[in-house]
Amino acid sequence: MILVIGDANDITTNITMEWIQHYTKNVKRINFSDYTPLNSLKITNQNCTTKIASVDISKVEKIWHRRGSIRFLPSTLRNATSSLYAYLKKEEDSLLKSLEDILGDTKEYIGSYHKEVENYKIDYLLKAKDCGIRIPDTLITTSKKELQSFFNTYDQIITKDIRYGIKIKARDSGIYSAGTFVVSEDMITSMKDDFAPTLVQEKIEKKYEIRVFFFKTTLYPMAILSQNDSKTSVDYRNYNREKPNRNVPVLFPKHIEQQILNFIKKSGLSTGSIDLIVDKSDNYVFLEVNPQGQLDWVSKHCNYYIEKNIAEYLVSK
């Protein structure tokens, strides 16, 4: 049996499920948006057995964790007071982490909710550097003096979130991340001498960006021609929906391909999406990796048929 963990509205999960069901009916899907009963996780001195949504996990051969997590908390508890829900969510997350580890020891477990949650950009930058991939010069600081010195070193610098984009909702307003943007001297001047930890990087003049989705050791790279649009020139994710960037398939030089495969192995990731820049000197520069990154647009624009390939891998013996 194949177990697929996804989201009801995730295009990739839906298309891949259609392909899987074309090949076999022996598949179970769990949606992040639905409550899923944990029938039992039984641990004894003899063995460890698991049953989720009436599925005996010992019958499962492969698990593809595409998107989100399993929700073991029923909706009545998800609507509990904020402090109670916060506690229950921590308990659930601890269980989910252990469950991923337990199942990963005995099954082929592709993808990870906790790799996505624990997506530490600084760690991945260092791993990429250790694999010989060029990275932007980076500073994390709480000091205005250090920030000013870094600013003075480069033509331009950018800033991005250290981990997650901020998303704070209030009754009549909210605070949301601006994504990646260029830092000006006026911004630095207006800051206090000490502030919350902030990440800045040299701004690299790019020829184009690359989004590469990977599944196991297969790479699906796509060039994003974002450099000539003022809205997307810093980061293609500042989308221009009226005039979208052109996206085309691209090939890596063999040594870059091997460095990326080494990074994937060193990071312990089985699937995900990596963002890179090719600079004006044709250097490949690593930016970040998203363990549950979107891939349907890569598949569509490049005619890679990634969903079909994933389905064929999952049904293979």
Image (cartoon, rainbow, N blue to C red):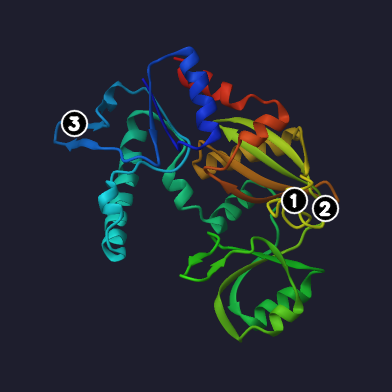
Q: Nearer the viewer, residue 299 or 58?
A: 299
Amino acid bearing label 2: Asp
Q: Earlier in the sequence, mark 2 or mark 3?
A: 3
The numbered disc on residue 240 is 1
The numbered disc on residue 284 is none
Q: Residue at x 42, y 47 (%)?
A: 114
- Determine the image quadrant of residue 1: top left
Residue 110: x and y in percent read: 46, 33
As helix, strand or loop, the secondary structure at mark 3 comes to: loop
- The residue labelled by disc 3 is 47
Residue 81: x and y in percent read: 28, 63
Amino acid bearing label 1: Asn
Q: Is residue 146 above or below residue 159?
A: below
Q: CA distance from mark 2 to mark 1?
A: 8 Å
Q: Residues within 10 Å of mark 3 (few under 14, many from 20)?
A: few
Q: Residue furthest front?
A: 172
Q: Nearer the viewer, residue 298 or 106?
A: 298
Q: CA distance from mark 2 to mark 3?
A: 58 Å
User: Relative to 150, is 195 on the left or the right?
Assistant: left
Q: Is residue 132 above or below residue 256?
A: below
Give the label, 2 or 3, closer to the camera.
2
User: Does the CB distance between marks 2 and 1 fall below 8 Å?
Assistant: yes
Q: Residue furthest bottom?
A: 193
- The residue labelled by disc 2 is 229
Q: Residue at x 59, y 55 (%)?
A: 126
Residue 41: x and y in percent read: 21, 37
User: Relative to 186, is 165 on the left or the right?
Assistant: left
